[in-house]
């Protein structure tokens, strides 16, 4: 069997994206509440917009790792879905329950079967859970992606999914209530992951060759996206919603390639950073699920303590939320691994009973 090229940079990318998604949520309040044009407002806007690549990147990584894993081996739909649903949906429903109970006891949610069903099924118990609903759709559809990328021209498929994505942003998303969690809204990014897995060496060569342009493009898109955000969100100026969506698509794509370059650089030169991001990557799903709870608790507690400065509160939230979310998630992941290893060793040492 031919030895395949490793894609260890994906763990670095996932670790960086995990940290970035927390930054997006922590900076969401200051960008909307600080005085427009103030130094703090500009800083938080740049941090917020510069981190908005997270959902596309997570979907890209899923497409990349899944296709790379199953491209050259047998694929059992039933076993695949069972494994994915167990690892994804069980924690999702547990944390959906946690968020529901938290907001219920705060007097925000109501105890109604219809309300509970709608919020759990649509990922609405907390603002970030829409992602789980989205990725679940791609798990269900993965067999189709695997089939067409194995059978047909990968360039043609990628181009087709890009066109579908753009057409949806233009004609479908504006009138669709839950467009933010519908798979077509992100189909290009999952497809891009499959495409990169199919053409890994060529894509890596492209990134190395144009690395400065890619990094510069990311920085330029951050500035441009921040400008657009300032125009339509802060100044309430009329802008084309479709153009904002297309800019987001371009920004996210450039960000993914920039992250691939950063991931490869860390793998080759930064052993300590590599270990840190790999550790975070292993716990990234739990970090994602729990961090908004601690952000809400932290922000409420700081206000109760009389810290009304938005800038000061946001900086303290960064320290508190990153520390608690990472420590708990990494601790839980390590505990799970320890218990699993202990169980395996016990089973191996168990005496064989004589008939």
Image (cartoon, grey):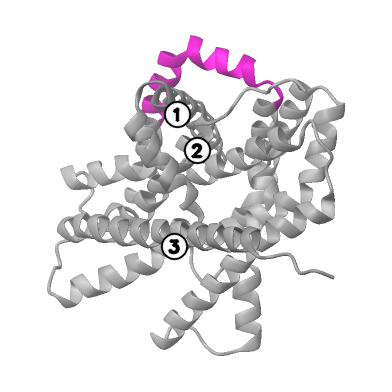
Indicate whether 100 appears above or below 322.
below
Indicate whether 271 appears above or below 55.
above
Residue 18 relative to residue 181: left or right: left
- Mark pair 1, 2: CA separation: 8 Å
> Which image quarter: residue 120?
bottom right
Residue ID for mark 3: 332
Q: Residues within 10 Å of mark 2 (few under 14, many from 20)?
A: many
Magenta-colored span = 198-221
Residue ID for mark 2: 11
* Residue occupying image coordinates x 33% and y 65%: 295
Pair 2/3: label in front:
3
Q: Residues within 10 Å of mark 3 (few under 14, many from 20)?
A: some
Q: Reading the chain from its start, which is encountered first: label 1 or label 2?
A: 2
Asked whether disc 1 touches disc 2, contact meaning CB atoms under 8 Å apart, the reply is yes
Indicate whether 269 appears above or below 340.
above
- Mark pair 2, 3: CA separation: 18 Å
Q: Reading the chain from its start, which is encountered first: label 1 or label 3?
A: 1
- Mark pair 1, 3: CA separation: 25 Å
């Amino acid at each position: 069997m031919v030895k395949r090229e490793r894609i260890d940079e994906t763990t670095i990318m996932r670790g960086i994206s995990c940290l970035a998604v927390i930054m997006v949520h922590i900076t969401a309040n200051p960008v909307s509440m600080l005085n427009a044009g103030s130094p703090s407002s500009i800083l938080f806007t740049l941090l917020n917009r510069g981190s908005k690549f997270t959902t596309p990147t997570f979907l890209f990584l899923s497409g990349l790792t899944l296709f790379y894993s199953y491209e050259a081996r047998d694929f059992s739909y039933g076993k695949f879905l069972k494994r994915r649903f167990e690892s994804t949906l069980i924690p999702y429903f547990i944390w959906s329950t946690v968020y529901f109970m938290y907001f219920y006891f705060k007097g925000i949610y109501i105890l109604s079967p219809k309300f509970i069903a709608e919020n759990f099924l649509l990922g609405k118990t907390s603002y970030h859970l829409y992602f789980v609903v989205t990725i679940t759709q791609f798990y269900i559809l993965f067999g189709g992606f695997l089939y067409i990328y194995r059978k047909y021209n990968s360039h043609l498929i990628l181009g087709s999914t890009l066109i579908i994505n753009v057409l949806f942003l233009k004609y479908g998303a504006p009138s669709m209530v839950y467009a933010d969690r519908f798979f077509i809204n992100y189909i290009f990014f999952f497809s891009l992951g499959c495409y990169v897995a199919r053409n890994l060496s060529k894509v890596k060569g492209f990134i190395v060759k144009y690395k400065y342009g890619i990094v510069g493009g990311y920085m330029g898109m951050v500035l441009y996206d921040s400008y657009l955000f300032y125009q339509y969100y802060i100044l309430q100026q009329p802008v084309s919603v479709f153009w904002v969506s297309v800019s987001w698509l371009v920004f996210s794509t450039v960000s993914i390639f920039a992250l691939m370059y950063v991931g490869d650089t860390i793998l080759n030169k930064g052993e300590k950073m590599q270990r840190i991001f790999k550790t975070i990557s292993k716990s990234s799903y739990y970090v994602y699920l729990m961090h908004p709870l601690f952000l809400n608790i932290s922000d409420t507690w700081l206000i109760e303590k009389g810290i009304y400065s938005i800038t000061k509160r946001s900086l303290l939230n960064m320290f508190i939320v990153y520390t608690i979310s990472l420590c708990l998630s990494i601790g839980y992941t390590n505990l799970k691994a320890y218990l699993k290893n202990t169980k395996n060793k016990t089973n191996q040492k168990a005496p064989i009973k004589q008939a």
